Amino acid sequence: MSDPHLGSGSSANPNLVLTLVYFLTIAAILIGTAVYFIVMARITDPEVRLMELITTQREVQHLIDNLSSQFSNFWRLPLRWRSMKPYYTHQTLSWIFILALVASVVVLIVALALDLAQVARISTLTYVVSLNALFMVRQHLYYIRRTYLTYDAEHYLVLDTTKFYYFDWSVFNVVQLGILVIEFLQLLSFPIRDLLDALYLSKNQQLNGNSDGSNTASFIIGIITMFANLSSKFYVIQFWFLVSVIGCIVLVMTVIHTYNVMRPHRPIAIYWVKYLLPLANLLYLPMLVMLIGSAACLSKIGTEDASDSSSGLLRCDSPSVVKPLYLALTVVAYTAGYVILTAFVTSFDRIPIKGEIHYKSQGVAFLKNMSMLLSIDFLLVANSYRHIRSILSLVIVLSMVCFNINTQPCFVEQINYWRTYGFCCILWVALIVTMLTNEDSTLSDTGTGGIVSALAV
């Protein structure tokens, strides 16, 4: 099956290039991280290395305690009204979202069994939104009650009052800055992709042809953000890779936890978990967004949007793709990946040293969750509701701007300033995209060059 998104005169397959870049980038990050820590272990004085290991073990144990507290708070849902006191709002909302989750799963199973494409799409959207909303409510309740859950009020008091004005140029801070830039480009890519997709459809309706400028721009965005716009053949490869990675994460966590519970006197050392945090932050959006893209693509099969030239991040129309199986696995993988990764990256609450770029966990939790809602908005909401999708994106990004200004989630004020500026840039682009995509005549007369000029104003 030929891919209509590939240029006829292209000598290299863009899908192959994107796939290679995706896997090579992950391999380079893993190898680079391992090499860095191996080299540092060899050149560091043994006594200093021992003190670092002791400190790291203490920090990781605090991370594990926070992670355990989050999961405990997530599952501790009282049934009786009196038991909900004084958190009636959180507990009531939690039960509402749980009922929505259960109902959407039942409807999704029936829709897949009866091949009701539109119903399957709506139930998939309902499930993903309800899951994210439920986890956000439970996390917010956790941050309200965490003093009582962890018995470490002094630690969190220090975190709330710590503030730095400048940062140093250590290796750790350089990595953090790199992650910030990549996250900014990833979030910025959502409204730009939406505009390019709308422009592509508009040009095709008028010219009944291809839009090379949109294809080239989408290819460049895929390279920079690691959100690969893949054909059906490469979708299958990446899908099973992501499902395998999440399955391995769940298996490793289960094995370590079970072993440490059964043999508390000889537990498995977990100091290395700290070094996975930058990697988890970097790959958080690419992994989960690709699963959202998979759900979006699969849920479009059999609907009006399936005939559009654009199908989000992925194209899954291969005959070898069994929609019920792949959609069910996507939902399960996203549920496990989202809960584990979000809890993991928001559980590291150590007190930073002066000049270190570090974040408050509640700030990480809010911004990560809002980033996921932004991806859900752009990928799962149907093209026929493009107006609503654009408005929702403005609300989400505006909330991120207000939160960053109000709470100052980073301990370094310079980072808070530049992060707010970055969110404002995304808000500006989303506003321009909303105005252009909601005016069909304007969009039809606007080329890729005109779009760039409009965004630069």
Image: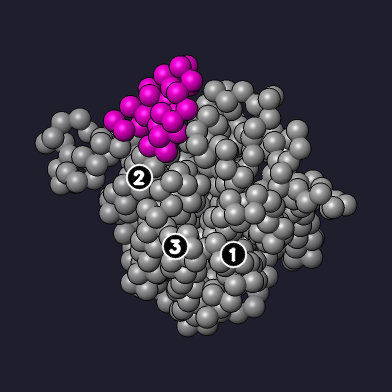
Q: Please tell me whether residue 78 is drawn above or below residue 386 in the rendered image.
A: above
Q: Is residue 373 left or right of residue 20?
A: left
| Residue type, numbered disc 1 | Leu
Q: Is residue 45 left or right of residue 419?
A: right
Q: Nearer the viewer, residue 426 or 116?
A: 116
The image position of residue 193, as x and y in percent, is 57, 57
Which residue shows up at 64% across the image and 39% down it? 315
Q: Please tell me whether residue 230 is drawn above or below residue 302 in the rendered image.
A: below
The residue that label 2 is drawn on is 133
Q: Is residue 197 left or right of residue 351?
A: right
Q: Earlier in the sequence, mark 2 or mark 1?
A: 2
> Which image quarter holds the N terminus?
top right
Q: Which mark is residue 185?
A: 1
Q: Which residues are magenta?
A: 99-126
Q: What is the CA distance from the residue labelled 2 to the residue labelled 1?
A: 25 Å
The residue that label 3 is drawn on is 439
Q: Nearer the viewer, residue 229 or 151?
A: 229
Whether the residues at callouts 3 and 1 have beta carbons within 8 Å, the answer is no
Which residue shows up at 79% across the image and 46% down it? 16
Overall secondary structure of the magenta stretch?
helix
Judging from the image, what secondary structure is the residue with disc 3 in? Answer: loop
| Residue type, numbered disc 2 | Ala
Q: What is the CA distance from the residue labelled 2 to the residue labelled 3?
A: 32 Å
